[in-house]
């Protein structure tokens, strides 16, 4: 889906190309129960919900502006299988159905706590984590090493053409690290 289809505001959004790879790495099943932690504008939430006719997506978000955007985007796209959960993970998981999949787009520096809670509820959960900052990548890798989890790591950088006079110049976006692990085969 084009990024321009989403209502944005000033909340960060996972861009289309990164969404496509991240959702692919989740290996969703039609009846999946997914937690989108740090759901932001809901771009990942919406795309997953549209792919899950019998599934449920819990959009977990602590920022009130983002929660408002989540509601607006869910209404715009007419998704009825999204449950918006305002709050901070992992406390926000309380009372939710056990997830089969989780996408972590923002953890508020609590990645190890979140992972332990998720895997404690479902040790065969498929998890995808997106990070941009090198410090965040280091924190995720340290947490996974402690937990004896060996993720697949992909670094993705997208460039888009921008018109400058009569020319088109490529303008690079931030590189994104996509870490994935777990699932039924694990």
Image (spheres, grey):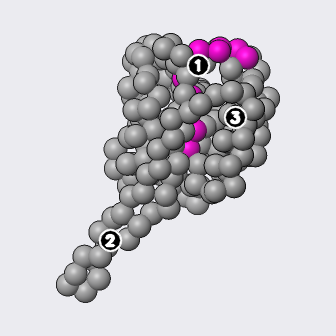
Where disc 2 sits, the SS reads strand
In the structure shown, which secondary structural element does the residue marked by tag 1 occupy? loop
Q: Is residue 97 above or below residue 134?
A: above
Give whichever of 18, 184 is nearer the camera.
184
100 horizontally vs 79: left or right: right
Q: Residue furthest bottom?
A: 165
Question: Which disc number belongs to residue 125?
Answer: 1
Q: Is residue 114 above or below residue 28?
A: below
> Would you call the spot at circle 2 few (<14 residues within 10 Å), some (14-19), or many (20 or more)?
few
Q: Position of residue 161 (x, y in %)?
A: 29, 69
The foreground one among 129 and 66 is: 129
How far across and how far down the image is residue 37, in percent?
63, 36
- Residue 119 appears in the rendering: yes
Residue at position x 64%, y 56% in the image: 134
Q: Which is nearer the N-term, disc 2 or disc 1?
A: 1
The reply to whether the magenta stretch includes residue 64 is no
User: Mark 3 sits on what residue?
Assistant: 145
Q: Dot 2 corresponds to which residue? A: 170
Which one is in front, 17 or 182?
182
The residues bearing labels 1 and 3 have C-alpha atoms spaced at a distance of 17 Å
Residue 180 relative to residue 20: left or right:
right
Q: Nearer the viewer, mark 3 or mark 2?
A: 3
3D distance between C-alphas at marks 2 and 1 = 38 Å
Span colored in magenta:
120-130
Decide if residue 88 is on the left or right side of residue 180: right
Q: Are marks 3 and 2 in contact (CB under 8 Å)?
A: no
């Amino acid at each position: 889906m084009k990024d321009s289809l989403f209502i944005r505001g000033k909340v960060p959004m996972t861009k289309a190309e990164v969404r496509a790879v991240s959702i692919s790495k989740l290996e969703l099943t039609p009846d999946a129960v997914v937690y989108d932690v740090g759901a932001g504008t809901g771009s990942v939430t919406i795309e997953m919900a549209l792919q899950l006719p019998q599934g449920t997506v819990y959009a977990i978000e602590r920022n009130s502006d983002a929660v408002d955007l989540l509601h607006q985007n869910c209404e715009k796209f007419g998704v009825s299988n999204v449950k918006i959960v305002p709050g901070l993970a992992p406390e926000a998981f309380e009372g939710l159905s056990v997830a089969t999949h989780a996408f972590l787009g923002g953890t508020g520096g609590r990645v190890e706590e979140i992972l332990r809670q998720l895997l404690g509820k479902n040790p065969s959960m498929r998890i995808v984590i997106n990070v941009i900052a090198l410090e965040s990548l280091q924190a995720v890798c340290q947490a996974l090493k402690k937990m004896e989890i060996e993720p697949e790591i992909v670094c993705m950088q997208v460039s888009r053409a921008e018109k400058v006079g009569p020319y088109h110049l490529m303008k690079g976006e931030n590189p994104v690290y996509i870490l994935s692990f777990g699932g039924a085969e694990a």
